Image: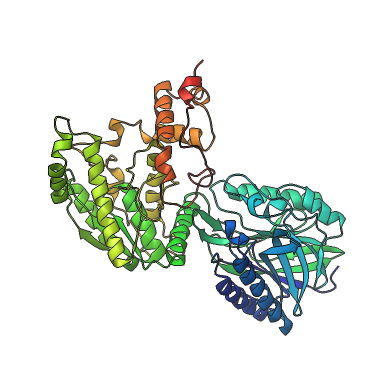
Amino acid sequence: MIDKPISIALAQLNSHLGNIAANVECLIDAREKANAGGADIIVTPEMFLSGYPCDDLVLRSDFMHEVAAGIARLTQVTADGGAAIIVGAPYREQDGDVVRIYNSVFVLDDGKIIGRRDKVNLPNYGVFDDKRNFTAGAMPGPVLVRGLKLGLPVCEDIWTPDVVECLQESGADMIVSLNASPFDSRKNDQRMAHAVSRTIESSLPLLYVNLIGGQDELVFDGGSFALNADGNLATHLPSFSQAVVQVQVKSDFGALSLTGQITPPDEDLAAIYRGLMLGVRDYVQKNGFPGVVLGLSGGIDSALVAAIAADALGADAVHAVMMPSPYTSDESLEDAADLASRFGMRLDTISIGPAMAAMDEMLADQFAGKDPDIAEENIQSRLRGTILMGISNKNGAMVMATGNKSEYAAGYSTLYGDMCGGFAPIKDVWKVQVFDLCHWRNANLPRGAAGPEGEVIPKRIIDKPPSAELRPDQKDTDSLPPYERLDAIMQALTEDAADIDAIVAQGYDIKEVAQASQLLFRAEFKRFQAAPGPKMTSIAFGRDRRLPLTSGFSPLKTSMK
């Protein structure tokens, strides 16, 4: 037990996966700030040095050599007498012809590696695939760091009692948990519940350090915290922001107590909007794009995507293109121009009318004797996609797809049309949430947003009935139930994996449920080819949900027997 207070800096940092040198420098900078505040120890999130999830990069010897060189560099840095470093990184161990890779925690102090602990419980569900790449570590004991015996579980290790119980029985003074826990709208309460359970069971205080940043489909929200042994909150770091915050550890009558600053987490719509901003910003910037280009239709989905992009990247990095057809209303043209003006983003207008006429002529023999239908509608969407991809190829900006989760679920999006692009920001946002987020953004300026405050999304865009405007007087409700019902049914089918009978038992119409189920299964091939988008719900299309493209299973065959 310590005889003087110890200061531990929680380094909630944004890791750039694969850029080991940049991550090393980021941590060195954070350590210098922590040293200036008198920190004794600095702790990073899980796998900070490499980024997470690395997937099969850890199988490459050249990648793992860079990680080892990064650890050596950080070890050398600690010879200056400043804060000890506790850093997450993969570790490669070779025993003859047998190679094992661990998800590890390195403890560095006084120019030496004084300890290493390996993740015991490897998650293999949802977005996690750790058992593919890592070997499970042995049950750990604590590591003595600056007079404190620290238990160092990694992320999943605190979601069950076994590892913390082992550490408590091995004499740990406190728990320091390194995490790369991705955001979803239900996650905050789950994390806190597990952490509180571990503190109460072990009677040990707990530090929880979480990654922040966007990594392909995942968004890490930070929200790191510290709990005293009674489960009471001592410190909470901001959501979706880098931060280095110190926690003071004192010994009071033989027991440790923690104190620090508390920043309440973002919740509900604020958390979703800021998560979308972070996902867009990191995907664009970490992949080296100079900006984004998107189709601005005058509808609510493209309006929300444009707002998120302008808030995340700044209006100068957003190029909006209105591509009217003969079916585009004057109202849509005016609304697109109004939104672009409110943000100050570039808006160009390129009519697809001439291209539609050319396609009609080119396909006249193929379409002869057949009435106009979805084929002509999809051509319109694909012409727009071709225009955006051409602009992207010429100028380097990344195309953003503007479809929402309701459309992706129902297949009401056009492959190689409005689905084309490098990133789909609202792919995991239900249509009803799109409306809610627009209302929220008009009433709030998100922390860290580059856009202006006030009503940035014109009210007329929010109020108009949703329509793709691919034929005269078209409305989404011509072929779909109202989104209030469709979203609830689709959410049950996807996020709850409910069958038709179970959803009908909740009071929904059998015809609407059957229609939604058919649409969902038929559109699997479209989602398989879709651009990635940031995960916001508990089950997102992509890493979370994996179904075969070719299958003879039909939910309708087994329902209502």
The quadrant in which the N terminus is found is: bottom right
The single residue placed furthest to the top in the displayed view is: 561
Q: Is residue 451 left or right of residue 93?
A: left
Name the residue located 61 percent from the left edge and 49 percent from the top edge: 129
Q: Give percent across and percent down for residue 329.
A: 18, 45
Q: Quadrant of residue 86?
A: bottom right
Is 294 placed above or below 529 here?
below
Query: Number of marks in the image?
Result: 0
Counting from the top left corner in percent of width and height, residue 175 is at 76, 59
Q: Is residue 160 left or right of residue 240?
A: right
Determine whether 80 is above or below 178 in the image.
Answer: below
Image colouring: rainbow
Residue at left 85%, top 73%?
A: 3
Q: Is residue 298 above or below residue 446?
A: above
Is 448 situated left or right of 78 in this image? left
Q: Please tell me which residue lies in front, 337 or 28.
A: 28
The single residue placed furthest to the bottom in the displayed view is 80
The answer to whether residue 293 is visible is: yes
Is residue 430 visible in this depiction of the protein?
Answer: no
- Nearer to me, 439 or 555: 555
**In the drawing, does residue 194 fall left or right of residue 557?**
right
Residue 340 occupies quadrant: bottom left
Q: Nearer the viewer, residue 199 or 524?
A: 524
The x and y percentages for residue 135 are 71, 54
Q: Position of residue 168 (x, y in %)?
A: 83, 55
Seen in the picture, residue 219 relative to 483 is either above or below; the reply is below
